[in-house]
């Protein structure tokens, strides 16, 4: 009964370093999403995927990359970390994109110093 | 583009009272609207979905209304409990079908 699992839960990076945030879901959902949440702000969509091999940009994609080689996994890559990328990152999945609830992981808290 | 406005001020109420949270949107009326609950350090959890042709939706102590004329949804928790304390987010689809989220309203229920 895992749902959406994100790792790591916390990470501190130095400016210019790179890292991959992992996300996996066990609900066989086709749709997966990456959001960032900054204090006092709503969730902002970074990238999404409608199925294995298909990804597309959301509202704030700059500085990030994604891949979707399997239905279960949707990793988010930061290539050159910048202080503006300090945020909480949430991965979510849904069975369809319209009028279906999204299931969220518990987030990765990322600080870039 | 579509914008969502939720009351950014925290709502403090006494246990047993009804909490009412507001979600206003601009521009076009969406086909549906969703409400989520988010606890500190956790991801949002889906609560309710209401479609544009539904005026009201209920689930246990929760009630959601959707007024397309006012461009507003109200989220009610009746007989509130301290365990209801959390941040509540509303979300609706943009013209591309992707969900956009409000910034959330923090609810605190005091015993």
Image (cartoon, grey):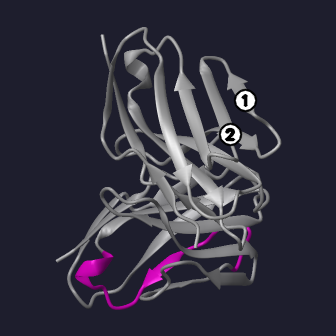
Q: Secondary structure at mark 1?
A: strand
Q: Is residue B64 left or right of residue A37?
A: right
Q: Is residue B25 left or right of residue A8?
A: right
How crowded is the residue under tag 2: few (<14 C-alpha within 10 Å), some, or many (20+)?
many
Disc on res. B19: none
Disc on res. B66: 2
Q: Residue drawn 74% across and 83% down?
A: A53
Q: Residue drawn 57% across and 62% down?
A: B100
**Residues shaded magenta:** A69-85
Based on the picture, tell me whether residue A102 belongs to the magenta stretch: no
Residue highlighted by disc 1: B57
In the image, residue B76 lies at what x, y percent?
A: 55, 26
Query: Can you say whether A7 is above or below A52 in the image?
Result: above
Residue ranking furthest to the left = A113
Q: Tell me whether the residue at label 2 lies in contact with that at label 1, contact meaning CB atoms closer than 8 angstroms.
A: yes
Q: Quick check: do tags 2 and 1 share a chain?
A: yes
Residue closest to the eye, A98 or B1 = B1
């Amino acid at each position: 009964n895992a749902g959406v699992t994100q790792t790591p839960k916390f990470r501190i990076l130095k400016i210019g370093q790179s890292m991959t945030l992992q996300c996996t879901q066990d609900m066989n959902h086709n749709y997966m999403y990456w959001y960032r949440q900054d204090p006092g702000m709503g969730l902002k969509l970074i990238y999404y995927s409608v199925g294995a091999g298909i990804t597309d940009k959301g509202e704030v994609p700059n500085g990030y990359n994604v891949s979707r080689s399997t239905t279960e996994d949707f990793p988010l890559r930061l290539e050159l970390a910048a202080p503006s990328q300090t945020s909480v990152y949430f991965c979510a999945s849904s069975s369809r994109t319209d009028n279906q609830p999204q299931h969220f992981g518990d987030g990765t808290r990322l600080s870039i110093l | 583009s579509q914008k969502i406005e939720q009351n950014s001020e925290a709502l403090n109420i006494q246990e047993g009272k009804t909490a009412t949270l507001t979600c206003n949107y601009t521009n076009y009326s969406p086909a549906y609207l969703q409400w989520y609950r988010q606890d500190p350090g956790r991801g949002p959890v889906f609560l309710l979905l209401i479609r544009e042709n539904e005026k009201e939706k209920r689930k246990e102590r929760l009630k959601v209304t959707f007024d397309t004329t006012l461009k507003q949804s109200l989220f009610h928790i009746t007989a509130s409990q301290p365990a209801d304390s959390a941040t509540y987010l509303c979300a609706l689809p943009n013209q591309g079908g992707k969900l956009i989220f409000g910034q959330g309203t923090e609810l605190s229920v005091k015993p």
